[in-house]
Amino acid sequence: MTDLAAFSTLLTDEGQALLTALRDYTPSQELAVASRLRRDHPAELVTAALGQARLRQRAVAKFGERDAHRMYFTPGGVEQSTRKAVAEHRAAAFARLGVRDVADLCSGIGGDAIALARAGVRVLAVDRDPLTVEVARANAAALGLTDLIEVRCADVTEVDTSPYDAVFVDPARRGGRASGGRIFDPEAYSPPLSWAVQAARKAPHAALKIAPGVPHETVPPEAEAEWVSDGGDVKEAVLWFGTRPGRVTATLLPGPHSLTGRGLPNPPVRAVGRYLYEPDGAVIRAHLVAEVAEDLGGGLIDETIAYITADEPRPTPYAAAYEITDELPFNLKRLKALLREREVGTLTVKKRGSAVEPEELRRKLKPKGPHAATVFLTRVAGAPTMLLGRPVA
């Protein structure tokens, strides 16, 4: 049975009943569950239902309980789809621009199309993989959005986007089954970034989703660049067209909190003060550490390290704050003695500019005691240094 035929069985009444029965099943009991279900159902259907149940459980982290257990997924779709909060943020941005319809190219299982439709935007969702297209179509139906989402199986490079207010392109950034890894060269995306940029230039508005590690020099001058994190994890970069050329933004979700670049020079390097700030990854990727440092009245501990130090605590959504109690040259014996003296048993290890692995360090230190601390393995003015402290509430 082909993947497409197997998926089609899940949409039958029997398949739906099986998926409902498997909603809360425990994967560790899968063998016993499969044996029991195969007594009353075709083996191919049981295999397909169990696989879909596993994917739905994985998808909860991205889509939430309610949507994940109504939607359908492929293994690649779970891995590559946009997290719900991020898709909703982008859909709201399109809606604020007055966009009424979007051509969603490389739409995958439809995560972004769903968010756009829920924001009141009509969507043409295009993907070239027949199974992925059927999954996206089933998702639109399952969530009651078929009136707003048209799903089409086609090569995105052959789609006429001129009737649409906006274009959204999410190129594939992973290799095929042979390689499977992330693709870092934007011209190796499928389709290449250069094609996506040309498609964006033809539309009144456009957004191109790219890897957050993309070099800043590859950003076209007429694009606005936004780096997005969710819950502290950097998720993506987006190039916006038809908005504010040259603007650079770091957006932190939930919130949202948006920090815009002010074209500041690199912050000064200064001695470690009482407080250390660890900027959010989106701030670092967007090269906006200087903006946060200025707002905090601080400087860098090293010209190559994205840790900000200051003498006073100031609230900011763009960095996590720590109160520093000790600054030591890198020396494991001294650190171990200090932790023993402070009775530190819960040790959080952070590193930036150090080759030491946190788990290896914990094994060597063997912390023990009722107290907690955070150690930063880093460089201060070029010298390997250990900073000991605790989070500021």
Image (tube, helix red, strand yellow):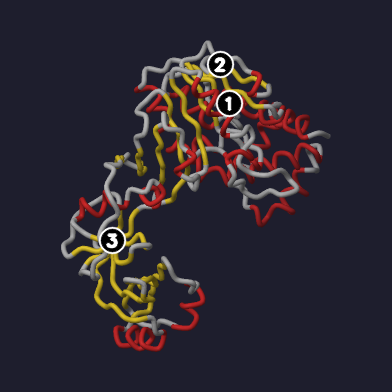
* Closest to the observer, 208 or 362: 208
Task: Residue 238: tell me if it is visible.
Answer: yes
Front-most of residues 78 and 159: 159
Instruction: Return the residue at label 1.
Output: 105
Mark positioned earlier in the residue sequence (1 or 3) = 1
- Describe the element under mark 3 as helix, strand or loop: strand
Mark 3 sits on what residue? 308
Q: Which residue is identified by label 2?
A: 161
Hey, which residue is sitting farthest right in the picture?
A: 1
Which residue type does callout 2 highlight?
Thr
Count residues near mark 3 (Cα–Cα under 10 Å), then give few for <14, some for 14-19, many for 20+.
Answer: many
Callout 3 touching callout 2 (CB < 8 Å)? no
Residue 334 place in picture, x, y as percent: 36, 87
Q: CA distance from mark 1 to mark 3?
A: 40 Å
C-alpha separation, residue under disc 3 versus residue under disc 2: 45 Å
Helix, strand or loop status at disc 2: loop
